[in-house]
Image: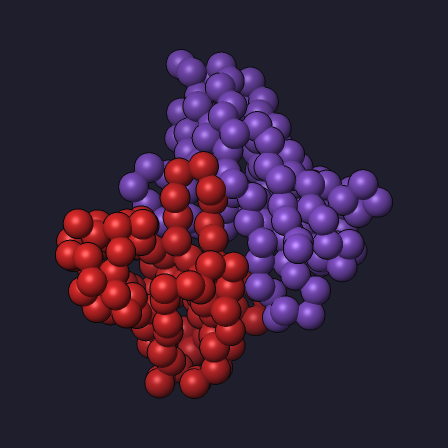
Amino acid sequence: DVKVTQSSRYLVKRTGEKVFLECVQDMDHENMFWYRQDPGLGLRLIYFSYDVKMKEKGDIPEGYSVSREKKERFSLILESASTNQTSMYLCASQTTEGVQYFGPGTRLTVL
Amino acid sequence: GENVEQHPSTLSVQEGDSAVIKCTYSDSASNYFPWYKQELGKRPQLIIDIRSNVGEKKDQRIAVTLNKTAKHFSLHITETQPEDSAVYFCAASIKGSNYQLIWGAGTKLIIKP
């Protein structure tokens, strides 16, 4: 049974703070993804990684960075949080056949 | 760029009736089309997927059809039940991207008792 966990379910930060969101998967998947989910906009890809230390920009990478130092862990970093980054953040891990398994999500509020 | 359009954004059906959600995609090279269900407060989960060498796939009350010529695919749910109430997302793979997906905006399905 695939397990994808995220470091926090709810997070409240202040404008300008540095924010770390962490995602861990236990299935040795190579591909991992970070999305943000906003009402009416579906899932928008921020960054993805297809191997350790490899990363690719998604559709909305501005204001974000990522880190993948170990295969099981993919971190999303908000260098200087802004109010327009208030959102639900979802991490996913992907099988070789393309099936994505999602974490429970982190609801981030930036005040 | 590539995009996926999903309709309708909200669908309300009587319990026991059928529900159909449609998606169109722009990348003619897309070859993998999954559907995910997200219940309120929960994470999205795959319910069915189809690959471009197949026109239709069924799994109990759920079916997906694919028309590659028209570049659209649809989710069909028959004999709807209250537990089918959720947001459904379609997605299409991007060519040469190792299964990077482009997602539809989602359809909120409401099952009326």
Name the residue at 18% across, 65% down.
A17
Above or below, comparing residue A102 to residue B91 in the picture: below
**Quarter of the image where one finds residue B8:** top right
* Residue B102 x, y percent position in the rendering: 58, 54
Left or right? Give the position of B24 relative to B19.
right
Is there any visible trace of residue B99 in the rendered image? yes
Say which colour chain B has: purple
* Residue A21 x, y percent position in the rendering: 27, 66
Of all residues, the one furthest to the right in this rendering is B69
Query: How are the colours assigned in the image?
Result: by chain
Name the residue at 81% across, 41% down.
B70
* Residue A89 x, y percent position in the rendering: 33, 55
**Quarter of the image where one finds residue A64:** bottom left
**Quarter of the image where one finds residue B104:** top right
Name the residue at 66% across, 55% down.
B1
* Residue A83 x, y percent position in the rendering: 26, 50
> Which one is in front, B60 or A39?
A39
Say which colour chain A has: red
> Which one is in front, A72 or B95?
B95
Left or right? Give the position of A47 relative to B27.
left
Left or right? Give the position of B26 relative to B41.
right
Q: Quarter holding the N terminus of chain A?
A: bottom left
Left or right? Give the position of A9 relative to B7.
left
Above or below, comparing residue A29 to residue A17 in the picture: below
Name the residue at 20% across, 62% down.
A16
Is there any visible trace of residue B48 in the rendered image? no
